[in-house]
Amino acid sequence: MSTTYKDTPTETVEVGGTSFAYRQLGTDTGVPVIFLNHLTGVLDNWDPRIVDGVAARHRVITFDNRGIGASQGTTPNSVAAMARDAIAFIRAMGFEQVDLLGFSLGGMVAQVIVEEEPKLVRRLILAGTGPAGGRGIDKVTSLTIRDMIKAALTFTDPKTYLFFTRTANGRTAARQFLERLKERTDNRDKAISLTAFRAQLKAIHAWGLQEPSDLTDIQQPVLVVNGDNDRMVPSSNSVDLARRLPDAQLSLYRDAGHGGIFQYHQEFVKEVLEFLAP
């Protein structure tokens, strides 16, 4: 397999008659780590430093869920349906047990996966995310639209506002992150469609309005990570997750927003490798 994410070929697998796009790299042995992506995220939105860092010791698989990027089908408008599709993808890849790394919307999907198929998941990493009914999650749509408008008016990538603080450190981290996302130049993924974007927003909004789940059912070890100043999914949700999960550890990165794992990618990779170690 490829040694760097920017050179990893995009492959496809049939999932119930629908083609799902994915990339895999890293080692050939051990429990694979499945990356679950954020709102609007496609294969090329994963920070290559994080993918390469985790792949140095693990098999890493990134994929476009149904209707996203190069994957076929219609994007579901509920987190539960997204989780079912992710489970079907994992099964189609032939895996009997996986570790999950879910960022933002992906972290919501990860929570449903581990509750629906507990034997499928060994360890769980929840970054920049929150529980069902978590504070402020039902405001993600309005905040995202406002920041997208602001970004358009200032000729800026929306992730600059959505993922990072407006401090000097945050601005620098945003520029560096966006440059890293450009490192892959060949065979880049398709951007998310407007229809899929709307479906994801609807799913996140409904998640924010749901009754809270009984997270004590999740017995797996969980690493909860976020910036200490997340505007999209308020950082208090990460604190809440760590408090309610029976076997959780929490890291909050200083002067960092929703994309804290990208701003502190070196520290995050180190924590992930330690957490996933047998």
Image (cartoon, helix red, strand yellow):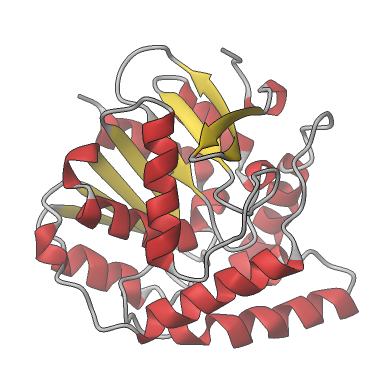
Q: Position of residue 33 (x, y in %)?
A: 39, 33
Q: Quadrant of the N terminus?
A: top right
Q: Residue at the location (24% across, 73% down)?
A: 240
- In this picture, residue 170 sits left or right of residue 104: right
Q: Nearer the viewer, residue 267 or 50?
A: 50
Q: Nearer the viewer, residue 12 or 219?
A: 12
Q: Quadrant of the C terminus?
A: top left
Q: Residue at the location (60% across, 65% down)?
A: 163
Residue 50 appearing in the image: no
Q: Position of residue 4 (x, y in %)?
A: 63, 21
Instruction: Identify the image quadrant of residue 267.
Output: top left
Question: Is 267 rendered above or below residue 212?
Answer: above
- In this picture, residue 96 sits left or right of residue 148: left
Residue 22 appearing in the image: yes
- In this picture, residue 209 sits left or right of residue 146: left
Q: Residue at the location (65% across, 47% down)?
A: 72
Q: In this view, which residue lies farthest toward the front?
A: 17
- In this picture, residue 83 sits left or right of residue 266: left
Q: Position of residue 223 (x, y in %)?
A: 27, 50
Question: Is 37 rendered above or below residue 152?
Answer: above
Instruction: Identify the image quadrant of residue 39.
Output: bottom right
How many numbered circles are shown?
0
Q: Residue at the location (27% across, 28% down)?
A: 96
Q: Position of residue 121 (x, y in %)?
A: 24, 40
Question: Is 38 rendered above or below residue 69?
Answer: below
